[in-house]
Image: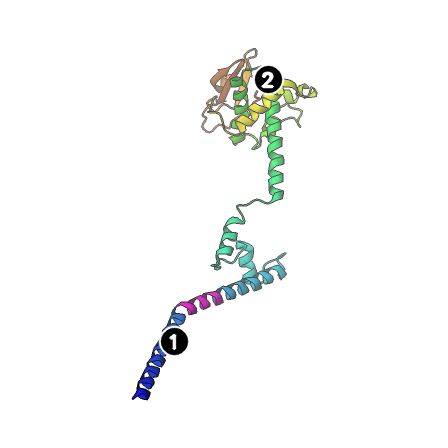
């Protein structure tokens, strides 16, 4: 009788252990296999990307791309079908993040543009009030935005300096620049230029693109619309014209 009880208990234990193993195997299949499949998919994807990158690197793209792979990578830089999060992040940010060389180049351009605008403020309005200096700087910036003038600050300020017909800003041609800017007026001019380039001032001149001092009466003034006056400068902008080409005139004769 005792032997039968032991046999029943042993069989019961074996049944319980067997059921536990079956449940464990089931859980492994439900939880583990998808993870294994996902890992395998990531490995395949990384392998595919590596092979495509190598093919692109070794391809000759100096002429017409010889394969659709090269054409696609040359156009998109990255395979558009890649779903790996790291590669997606790289694709999104690679164009948004400038290189060190780009940053240095942009810094040099900005420094030069500040210098040109500072010189315009200094030579044209260094004895003016802050409002008068800002107004002069705004004319330069308005010209940069206008299709009738160069699209850089330095281009606007020194337009005509290379020609014998005269400059748009008189100081660029009348010898004023032979005396280098200095002192508190130069510091104030630089501060004004930086202030205006950052867009930290509300519009002041009503889109003016020209001005002259109050002690002169240039021939072009009647052909433009007067907008404002600050200190000793009177400001103008182009009048609306139909079927008439706008004539470029000097800012300050």
Which residue is nearer to you in this view: 155 or 121? 121
| Callout 1: SS | helix
Magenta span dominant secondary structure: helix
Where 234 sits versus 31, above or below?
above
| Callout 2: SS | loop
Q: Which residue is mark 2?
A: 126
The quadrant of the image that shows the C terminus is top right
Q: Which residue is mark 1?
A: 21
Where 97 sits versus 252, above or below?
below
> Magenta includes 109?
no
Within 10 angstroms of label 1, few (less than 14), some, or many (20 or more) residues? few
The answer, for residue 168, to whether it is visible in the render is no
Residue 98 in which image quadrant: top right
Disc number for residue 48: none
Please report whichever mark, 1 or 2, sits nearer to the chain's N-terminal start.
1
100 relative to 3 in the view: left or right: right
Residue 6 at what x, y percent from top left?
33, 84
Residue 182 at what x, y percent from top left?
66, 20
Within 10 angstroms of label 2, few (less than 14), some, or many (20 or more) residues? many
Which residue lies most toward the front here? 2
Which residue lies most toward the right here? 178
Disc 1 vs disc 2: which is toward the camera? Answer: 1
Where 193 sits versus 87, above or below?
above
The quadrant of the image that shows the N terminus is bottom left
- Residue at image position (54%, 30%) is 144
165 relative to 223 in the view: left or right: right
Magenta segment range?
31-40
The answer, for residue 231, to whether it is visible in the render is yes
Q: Measure the C-alpha gap from mark 1 to mark 2.
A: 90 Å
Residue 61 at what x, y percent from top left?
61, 57
Residue 244 at what x, y percent from top left?
48, 27
Residue 26 in which image quadrant: bottom left
């Amino acid at each position: 009788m005792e032997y039968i009880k032991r046999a029943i208990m042993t069989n019961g234990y074996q049944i319980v252990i067997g059921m536990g193993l079956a449940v464990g195997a089931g859980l492994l299949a439900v939880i583990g296999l998808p993870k294994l499949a996902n890992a395998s998919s990531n490995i395949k994807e990384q392998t595919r990307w590596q092979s495509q990158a190598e093919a692109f690197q070794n391809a000759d793209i100096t002429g017409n791309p010889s394969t659709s792979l090269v054409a696609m990578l040359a156009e998109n830089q990255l395979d558009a079908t890649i779903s790996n999060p790291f590669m997606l992040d790289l694709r999104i940010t690679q164009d948004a993040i400038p290189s060190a060389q780009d940053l240095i180049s942009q810094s040099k351009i900005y420094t030069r543009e500040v210098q040109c605008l500072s010189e315009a403020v200094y030579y044209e309005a260094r004895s003016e009030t802050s409002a008068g200096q800002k107004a002069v700087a705004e004319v330069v910036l308005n010209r940069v935005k206008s299709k009738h003038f160069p699209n850089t600050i330095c281009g606007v300020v020194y337009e005509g300096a290379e020609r014998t017909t005269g400059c748009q800003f008189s100081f660029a041609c009348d010898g004023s620049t032979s005396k280098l800017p200095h002192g508190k007026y130069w510091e104030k001019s630089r501060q004004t230029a930086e202030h205006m380039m950052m867009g930290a001032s509300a519009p002041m001149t009503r889109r003016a693109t020209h001005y002259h001092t109050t002690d002169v009466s240039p021939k072009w003034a009647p052909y433009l619309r007067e907008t404002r006056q600050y200190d000793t400068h009177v400001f103008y902008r182009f009048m609306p014209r139909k079927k008439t080409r706008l004539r470029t005139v000097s800012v300050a004769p």
